[in-house]
């Protein structure tokens, strides 16, 4: 499981001209799921995101989590995070999970984050063509991969 986490002052996702997810201050997260992802990956990534200290405290030091700040989360699936680009110029997405595997993992990931955060999160629509807009605050952007826990 790969995520791109952005600290935002606002973000929204639309599909077919309709806003389906919108947040104020918090985290905009793109998630890519691969065939090998399991409940351990879901739990680890959810805990990491909820507790990631990337919000400023009173002294201006990144010392607070999204949970500490009562921030919001917008989660959008993005299979292209697993693009392989080593050969040629056309990315391969062979590592990205097929929908029958990815959808249950995505839905469990949403539930796990909501349980840990103690509230609902906003989401995109799995597999849909979406437009995402955001204001990256900082900018702060962090990449996390459960297969490379560094």
Image (cartoon, rainbow, N blue to C red):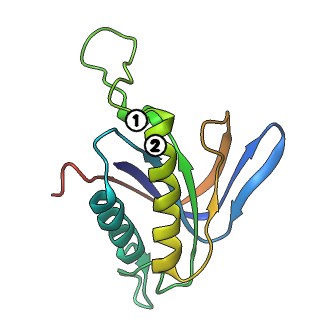
Position of 124 compared to 43: left or right?
Answer: right
Q: Which residue is denoted by mark 2 in the rendering? A: 102
Judged left or right of residue 31, residue 17 is right
Instruction: Decide which of 23, 37 is in the foreground and name it.
Output: 37
Q: Quadrant of residue 8?
A: bottom right
Residue 138 is at least partly visible in this image: no
Q: In the displayed image of the protein, which residue is found farthest to the left?
A: 150
Q: Residue furthest bottom?
A: 58
Local secondary structure at mark 2: helix
In the rendered image of this protein, does residue 39 appear above or below residue 95? below
Q: Are marks 2 and 1 in contact (CB under 8 Å)?
A: yes
Mark with earlier residue (2, 1): 1
Circle 1 residue: 97
Judge whether residue 35 can be spotted in this image.
Answer: yes
Residue 71, how many percent across, how many down?
A: 57, 77
Residue 47 position within the rendered picture, expressed as x and y whole percent measured from the top left: 35, 72
């Amino acid at each position: 499981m790969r995520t791109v986490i952005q600290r935002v002052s606002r973000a929204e996702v639309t599909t077919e001209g309709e806003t389906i997810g919108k947040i104020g201050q918090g985290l905009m997260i793109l998630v890519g799921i691969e065939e090998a992802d399991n409940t351990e990956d879901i739990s680890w990534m959810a805990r990491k995101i909820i507790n990631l200290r990337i919000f400023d405290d009173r002294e201006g030091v990144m010392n607070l989590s999204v949970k500490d700040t009562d921030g919001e989360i917008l989660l959008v699936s993005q299979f292209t995070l697993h693009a392989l680009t080593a050969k040629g110029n056309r990315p391969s997405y062979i590592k990205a999970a097929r929908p029958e595997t990815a959808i249950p993992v995505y839905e469990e990931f949403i539930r796990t984050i909501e349980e840990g955060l103690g509230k609902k999160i906003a989401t995109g629509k799995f597999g849909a063509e979406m437009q995402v807009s955001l204001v990256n605050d900082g900018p702060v952007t962090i990449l996390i991969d459960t297969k490379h826990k560094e």
